[in-house]
Image (cartoon, coloured by chain):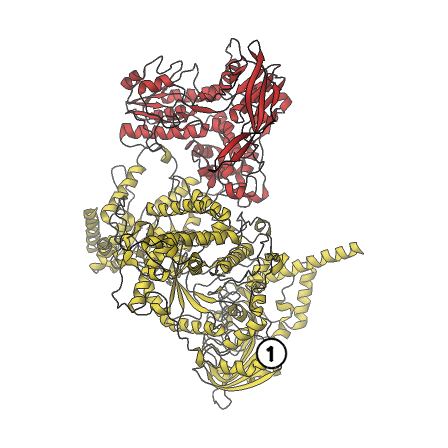
């Protein structure tokens, strides 16, 4: 095959010299006698050869192959140089399928297939941050797992590959085997393809870790608290691992190196379990019953549950936060704690239980991230990416957004919630450091975690995260969370945690950073053996997600996206939630079993304490006898490598980060407002402010939220006036009852996560610049605002009010991407906006002053309509007619637009003294007509549905009342 | 995958049955297979689980979600193809399998499982009706000869698979007709015998030669098989019945179930049976609470017994198993078969102490109640409850207490084959090889008494092992 590839590349070169400008690589002539070269290696070989000869740009490369069928196949061919791909076999197969499914005509099915592949490619490219096919083509943004270095260098030059593996010989061998099967008379393949079993288990198909037996044994063990059944489960899993399903399955312990110790000398299980956490699975993706059961269980063992990115019902933590301890009594249940109307399958509780998720996640969409939410955490986790689908955000389909879920996420029921891939307040490691600082201020008791995904280079990122003052970093492996992932991400995104974790440990130790940051690893942790290997590769803590869900009753339906989970876990359907049968006891049993298995291994390996074991990759070895023909070339020495550092350099977490909180202005604010918080007596404060004062107001808001919850104080109880240039995140998470008034200007992130407070910014009156023409606040203002109001006399930077879900804001102009991904709230822009306004906006309203009628050209109209701001009487008439015709009304906040917009502009004038507002109001009758109302389609539909629902409810109520009468 | 919300909207459909009063007057099948719409609606209930527990619950690993889906979409023939890809004889299992797949169905956790067996029954009946079941003779003959000894479901499956792989197969049977327990153990009212004949016709065209009335070790020597064939598969079953050595056992009217049941099947087949053991007008006591016992009950009722009683030594199992600790595995629970529905007095935890009679004929049975207690080592032990002895009139006693091992001592001795601790032929389930070169074993003879579906599995896998042995590789599925 090597020779064939060389001659193919030479052929292509010749063709170019003969002035051909398109080269087509085809495997159409495959026959019983002719074995095709796998399309990817052929494409890459030709592409690399032409690149090396400097000829690549003079020719177009087209690949005609029967082997491309999944999105990933196309992505690979494109990534290694194919400018066009013709999947002839896939297309012919679709035409053939027509015979079985006559209702779809073959042309139509081919069209749909091509569309699906294209959409898949869009998704892949967007994940990688690449906008055009041209840029993606030949970009080689892949990491190979299990390819020989020399092979990669020759055909896939520059691609990362860290554990060696197969080379061209094995690729050819595999091609031969498949070819032989294709032309054999195998009865199973006579008129059907192999069952496969990649995405759904099949007995004769692809091997899986979760099998009927492993699931049944785990469930039975946890339910009956049976150690012997757990042993059977662990044996199955650890044994499965050896069948080449995981990298760790190929490892073995060097048990001869250290003297074994009696198990009684090993750290007790109740200490080991404290290192365990559950994975981030949002309330929304799973039911409240399943979510809370995990929290209760983790709190019982002193571990941590992770709320995921969907917020959390405040009733689960409010009482506990105020009392400073659990308020659960014996006899209480989940329903008695959070309300019978919120629970379908009740879960009994014990005195001292806590329903609070100790880890609160902060993801790109910032669902439900209020000051109160932040203040209730022991750890705040910034989700940079998800192991199962790196580069994508959480995706909750509309039918899972029930009324309850919408309330928690400050969104509209029935509207799907797709988290944006990036955090709009993080574009650099400095931005991440700022978010870490914001969160630490909002809740100084919480440690700050950053969740990363295993991939090549993650070590460097982790080092940056440690320098950005995170207390904790999570390295997520590729094979978790499959239920909520698109199929193209399940198999082909991310890498095994073994690789990312090893790289993280090596980089952190090498840079003497390891001591100040805890490392957690997650991604299909199942047994004590997994935990011990994780520890040896450098993890302090361990995240488990699927296994505890299985313990709760999950049977891996892989229907999480359909809302039809038959065991009441991954569903919001009340009828199906009734079937939930999990219990905290079972989850507790499972974690203690894992800890016991860990202890047995520790005894064998001679470790008294868990900490000693961390980073001891020298005690791991590659298994001696790996029978599989494709596993022979593997080499894990890079994974087991330990940096040569002096012994005093920490290998596990043993120090604290210095967050620099002592310098915060908020200490003064809190002291001065202490009485006001106690008595609700208004207080007026004044400060000089400088740009070194960052996250001002966050710590104060956290303190109020912890004490008083989201309700906070009456409006304007604490009124602080600042003079000067504020640093970043001015008024972040500002709580109800606080007003921040700033004379001067601010940096980025003003009002981030605004939680009910009021922010007013206007320039120094001595400044000669015209306010409405100059920037007064920085970029990414009001990102993730939940509630509250803000008035800015002057222009905002880029990304104004992104992910706003309920706050009011008035500003005199914005940069690009204003109101992106907004799901609620009201924004008034009195001046010119930048481009791409309202992209991805699904809720809330923006009123934009557009005197020269050019706004439409700067607005992203894919999800919104532009309407005129009608006079109040006219809108009243229209809406009354609508209601009369039974269509439902579209009133935002139950108010007509004119009074709403006008009152906001009036407040703007009152608070900021804006001369622009004054002019507009003075001439309101004329100016009103120059406002454009930006109305999201989804929101309009939801409003009218909600109105119709309410009207119907009123009719039923009235009928009931008459009956009673 | 079926219909996404099918399992929420649609109910399990039980196959209709002829009313009891009518069906006990004949020996024909009385279960009515589903109509097209019913089958489609039942297929719609399948959730296409990410992990289909049914597939592992099924001993032959039927690809159940796939054919459920095709059934929902009314692609009957494609569904049958998938079904046939793992099961040689769906018409047998679709009728008499206890359906461990349904016990493992994820809907069984908190709902009624998908009627998998009823769909299987429907598909294969439809297939025969439409003429879709045709012989699949091999394109190439290998020239190898294989003897399969024992023509029950294991032997039939093994023979069919080997024939399709191109080997010349001779299927030996001691009895006068092919089919083993399918033919002479299972009554016609549960499975009519023309179904076997129909399959035999197919197998014949695929190259299987049938030799009934050939008792290997008696009529033909084991040695000669080894001389004449390239490989020998022993698929002889576990026919040695467990006896009840109590006083009175030798009285007339005390019989093994397998003396009683085959006679009736022969009569139904049109044979004349001299001195047939008949239940008519008699008080029948069946000892043993399993499937064979149940068949004795059904046959006795059809023979118009005066009364039918069934005893079981073990205590009465619970009506519902403890699902959280049992699912997806096969539950021990109270099972009421169609034969039980036809009339029987069932009693549990009863040990028969002796039979008494006059003139050498049994007239009554003396039994006592027992209790099961855990001994010091945790094993269950049976203890008689003092003073619980009772009598019961019994003119016909049928012993259906299971089988202890292979029933062909001559043949096994002649081959000189090694046995395991339970007297079964020793062979593993990877290569199915016995201690004697080129002799293989599968089915009940190897694993002990079991289900038809396990026999089919072993027959198929053994065929693959033999094919690999003969040819070096095999394309036959395991």
Decide if residue B309 is in sight here: yes
Q: Quadrant of residue B447?
A: top left
Residue found at the very far bottom of the displayed protein: A766
Q: Note whether A202 is above or below B209 in the view shown.
A: below
Depth check: give the residue in front, B296 or A562: B296
- Residue A893 pos. (x, y %): 62, 68
- Residue B201 pos. (x, y %): 42, 20
User: At 69% across and 65% down in the image, what residue appears?
Assistant: A880
User: At 39% across and 45% down in the image, what residue appears?
Assistant: A236
Depth check: give the residue in front, A646 or A782: A646
Quarter of the image that includes the C terminus of chain B: top left
Q: Is residue A320 left or right of residue A305?
A: right
Question: How many marks overall?
Answer: 1
User: At 75% across and 55% down in the image, what residue appears?
Assistant: A960
Decide if residue A477 is in sight here: no
**Hue of chain A?**
yellow
- Residue A589 pos. (x, y %): 48, 52
Q: Note whether A368 is above or below B108 in the view shown.
A: below
Q: Note whether A29 is above or below A417 in the view shown.
A: above
Give the residue number, with chain letter if any, for mark 1: A678
- Residue A297 pos. (x, y %): 51, 57
SS for tag 1?
Answer: helix
Q: Is residue A15 left or right of residue A119?
A: left
Chain represented in red: B
Q: Few, some or many C-alpha atoms within 10 Å of disc 1 (few <14, some 14-19, many ≥20)?
A: few
Subunit under mark 1: A
Depth check: give the residue in front, A784 or B353: B353
Q: Note whether B273 is above or below A116 in the view shown.
A: above
Q: Is residue B286 left or right of residue A538?
A: right
User: At 65% across and 58% down in the image, what residue appears?
Assistant: A949
């Amino acid at each position: 095959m090597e020779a064939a590839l060389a001659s193919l590349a030479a052929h292509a070169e010749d063709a170019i010299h003969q002035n051909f400008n398109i080269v087509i690589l085809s495997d159409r002539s495959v026959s019983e006698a002719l074995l095709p070269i796998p399309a990817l290696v052929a494409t890459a070989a030709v592409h690399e050869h032409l690149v090396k000869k400097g000829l690549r740009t003079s020719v177009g490369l087209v690949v005609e192959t029967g082997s491309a069928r999944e999105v990933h196949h196309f992505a690979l061919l494109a990534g290694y140089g194919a400018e066009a791909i013709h999947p002839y076999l896939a297309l012919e197969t679709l035409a053939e399928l027509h015979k079985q499914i006559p209702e779809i005509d073959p042309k139509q099915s081919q069209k749909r297939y091509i569309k699906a592949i294209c959409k898949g490619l869009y998704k892949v490219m967007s994940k990688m941050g690449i906008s055009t096919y041209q840029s993606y083509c030949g970009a080689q943004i892949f990491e190979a797992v299990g390819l020989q270095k020399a092979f990669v260098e020759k055909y896939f030059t520059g691609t990362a590959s860290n554990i060696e593996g197969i080379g061209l010989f094995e690729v050819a061998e595999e091609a031969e085997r498949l070819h032989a099967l294709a032309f054999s008379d195998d009865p199973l393949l006579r008129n059907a393809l192999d069952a496969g079993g990649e995405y759904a288990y099949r007995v004769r198909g692809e091997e899986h870790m979760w099998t009927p037996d492993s699931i049944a044994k785990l469930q039975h063990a946890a339910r009956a608290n049976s150690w012997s059944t757990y042993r059977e489960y662990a044996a199955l899993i650890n044994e499965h691992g050896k069948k080449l399903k995981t990298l760790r399955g190929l490892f073995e312990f060097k048990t001869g190196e250290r003297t074994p110790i009696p198990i009684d000398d090993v750290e007790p299980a109740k200490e080991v379990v404290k290192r365990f956490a559950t994975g981030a699975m949002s309330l929304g993706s799973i039911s409240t019953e399943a979510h809370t059961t995990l929290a209760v269980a983790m709190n019982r063992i002193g571990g941590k549950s992770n709320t995921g990115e969907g917020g959390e019902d405040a009733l689960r933590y409010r009482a506990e936060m105020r009392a400073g301890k659990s308020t659960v009594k014996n006899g209480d249940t989940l329903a008695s704690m959070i309300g019978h109307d919120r629970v379908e399958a009740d879960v009994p509780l014990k005195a001292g239980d806590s329903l609070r998720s100790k880890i609160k996640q902060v993801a790109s969409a910032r669902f439900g991230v209020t000051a109160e939410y932040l203040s209730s955490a022991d750890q705040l986790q910034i989700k940079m990416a998800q192991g199962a689908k790196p580069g994508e955000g959480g995706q909750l389909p509309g039918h899972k957004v029930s009324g309850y879920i919408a309330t928690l996420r400050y969104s509209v029921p029935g509207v799907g919630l797709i988290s944006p891939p990036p955090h709009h307040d993080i574009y650099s490691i400095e931005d991440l450091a700022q978010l870490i600082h914001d969160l630490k201020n909002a809740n100084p008791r919480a440690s700050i975690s950053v969740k990363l995904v295993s991939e090549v280079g993650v070590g460097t990122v982790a080092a940056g995260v440690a320098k950005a003052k995170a207390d904790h970093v999570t390295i997520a492996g590729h094979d978790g969370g499959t239920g909520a992932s698109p199929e193209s991400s399940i198999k082909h995104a991310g890498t095994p945690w073994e690789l990312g974790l090893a790289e993280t440990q090596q980089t952190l130790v090498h840079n003497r950073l390891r001591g100040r940051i805890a490392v957690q690893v997650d991604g299909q942790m199942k047994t004590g053996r997994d935990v011990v290997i994780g520890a040896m590769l450098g993890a302090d803590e361990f995240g488990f997600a699927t296994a505890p869900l299985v313990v709760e009753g999950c049977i891996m339906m892989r229907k999480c996206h359909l809302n039809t989970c038959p065991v009441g876990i991954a569903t919001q359907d009340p009828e199906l939630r009734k079937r939930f049968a999990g219990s905290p006891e079972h989850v507790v049993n499972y974690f203690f079993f894992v800890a016991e298995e860990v202890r047995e291994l520790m005894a064998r390996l001679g470790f008294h304490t868990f900490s000693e074991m961390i980073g001891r990759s020298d005690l791991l070895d590659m298994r001696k006898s790996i029978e599989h023909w494709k596993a022979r070339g593997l080499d894990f020495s890079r994974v087991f490598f330990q940096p040569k550092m002096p012994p005093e350099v920490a290998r596990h977490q043993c120090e604290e980060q210095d967050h620099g909180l002592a310098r915060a202005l908020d200490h003064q604010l809190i002291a001065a407002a202490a009485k006001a918080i106690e008595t609700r007596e208004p207080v007026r404060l004044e400060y000089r402010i400088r740009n070194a004062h960052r996250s001002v107001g966050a710590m104060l808001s956290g303190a109020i939220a912890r004490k008083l919850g989201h309700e906070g104080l009456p409006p304007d109880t604490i009124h602080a006036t600042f003079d000067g240039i504020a640093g970043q995140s001015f008024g972040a998470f500002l709580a109800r009852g606080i007003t921040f008034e700033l004379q001067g200007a601010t940096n980025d992130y003003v009002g981030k996560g605004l939680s009910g407070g009021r922010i007013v910014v206007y320039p120094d009156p001595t400044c000669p610049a015209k306010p409405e023409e100059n920037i007064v606040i920085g970029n990414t203002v009001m990102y993730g605002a939940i509630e509250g109001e803000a008035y800015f006399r002057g222009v905002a930077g880029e990304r104004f009010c992104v992910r706003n879900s309920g706050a009011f804001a008035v500003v005199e102009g914005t940069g690009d991407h204003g109101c992106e991904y907004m799901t609620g709230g009201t924004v008034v822009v009195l001046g010119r906006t930048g481009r791409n306004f309202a992209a991805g906006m699904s809720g809330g309203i923006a009123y934009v002053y557009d005197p020269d009628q050019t706004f439409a050209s700067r607005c992203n109209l894919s999800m919104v309509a532009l309407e005129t701001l009608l006079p109040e009487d006219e809108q009243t008439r229209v809406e009354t007619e609508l209601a009369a015709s039974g269509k439902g009304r579209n009133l935002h906040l139950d108010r007509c637009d004119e009074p709403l917009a006008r009152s906001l502009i009036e407040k703007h004038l009152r608070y900021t003294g804006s001369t622009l507002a004054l002019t507009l109001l003075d001439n309101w009758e004329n100016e009103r007509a120059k406002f454009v109302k930006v109305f999201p389609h989804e929101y309009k539909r939801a409003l009218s549905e909600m109105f119709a629902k309410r009207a119907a409810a009123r009719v039923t109520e009235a009928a009931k009342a008459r009956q009673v009468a | 995958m079926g219909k996404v919300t099918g399992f929420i909207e649609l109910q399990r459909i039980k196959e209709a049955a002829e009313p009891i009063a009518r069906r006990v007057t004949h020996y024909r099948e009385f279960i009515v297979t589903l109509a097209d719409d019913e089958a489609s609606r039942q297929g719609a209930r399948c959730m296409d689980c990410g992990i289909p527990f049914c597939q592992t619950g099924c001993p032959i690993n039927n690809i159940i979600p796939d054919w459920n889906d095709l059934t929902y979409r009314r692609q009957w023939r494609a569904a049958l193809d998938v079904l046939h890809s793992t099961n040689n004889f769906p018409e047998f299992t679709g009728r008499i399998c206890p359906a461990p797949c349904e016990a493992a169905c994820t809907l069984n956790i908190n709902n009624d499982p998908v009627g998998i067996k009823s769909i299987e029954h429907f598909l294969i009946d439809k297939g025969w009706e439409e003429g879709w079941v045709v012989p699949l003779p091999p394109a190439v003959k290998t020239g190898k000869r294989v003897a399969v000894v024992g023509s029950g479901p294991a032997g039939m499956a093994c023979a069919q698979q080997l024939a399709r792989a191109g080997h010349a197969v001779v299927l030996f049977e001691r009895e006068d007709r092919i089919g083993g327990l399918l033919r002479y153990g299972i009554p016609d009212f549960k499975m009519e015998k023309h179904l076997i004949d129909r399959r035999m016709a197919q197998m014949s065209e695929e190259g299987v030669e049938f030799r009934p009335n050939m008792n290997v070790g008696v009529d033909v020597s084991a040695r000669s098989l080894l001389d004449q064939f390239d490989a020998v598969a022993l698929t002889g079953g576990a026919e040695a019945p467990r006896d009840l050595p109590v006083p009175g056992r030798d009285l007339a009217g005390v019989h093994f179930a397998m003396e009683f049941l085959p006679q009736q099947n022969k009569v139904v087949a049109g044979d004349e049976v001299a001195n047939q053991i008949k239940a008519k007008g008699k008080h029948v006591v069946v000892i043993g609470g399993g499937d064979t016992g149940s068949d004795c009950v059904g046959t006795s009722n059809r023979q118009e017994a005066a009364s039918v009683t069934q005893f079981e030594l073990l205590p009465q199992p619970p009506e519902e198993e403890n699902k959280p600790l049992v699912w997806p595995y096969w539950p021990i629970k109270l099972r009421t078969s169609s034969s039980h529905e036809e009339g029987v007095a069932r009693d549990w935890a009863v040990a028969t102490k002796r039979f008494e009679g006059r003139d050498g004929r049994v007239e009554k049975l003396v039994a006592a109640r027992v209790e099961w207690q855990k001994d010091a080592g945790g094993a269950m032990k049976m203890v008689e409850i003092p003073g619980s002895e009772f009598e019961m009139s019994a003119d016909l006693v049928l012993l259906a207490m299971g089988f202890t091992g292979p029933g062909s001592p001559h043949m096994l001795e002649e081959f000189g084959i090694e046995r395991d601790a339970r007297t079964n032929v020793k062979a593993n389930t990877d290569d199915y090889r016995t201690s004697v070169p080129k002799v293989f074993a599968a089915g009940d003879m190897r694993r002990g008494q079991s289900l038809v579906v396990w026999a089919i599995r072993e027959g198929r896998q053994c065929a693959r092992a033999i094919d690999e042995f003969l040819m070096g590789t095999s394309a036959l599925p395991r």
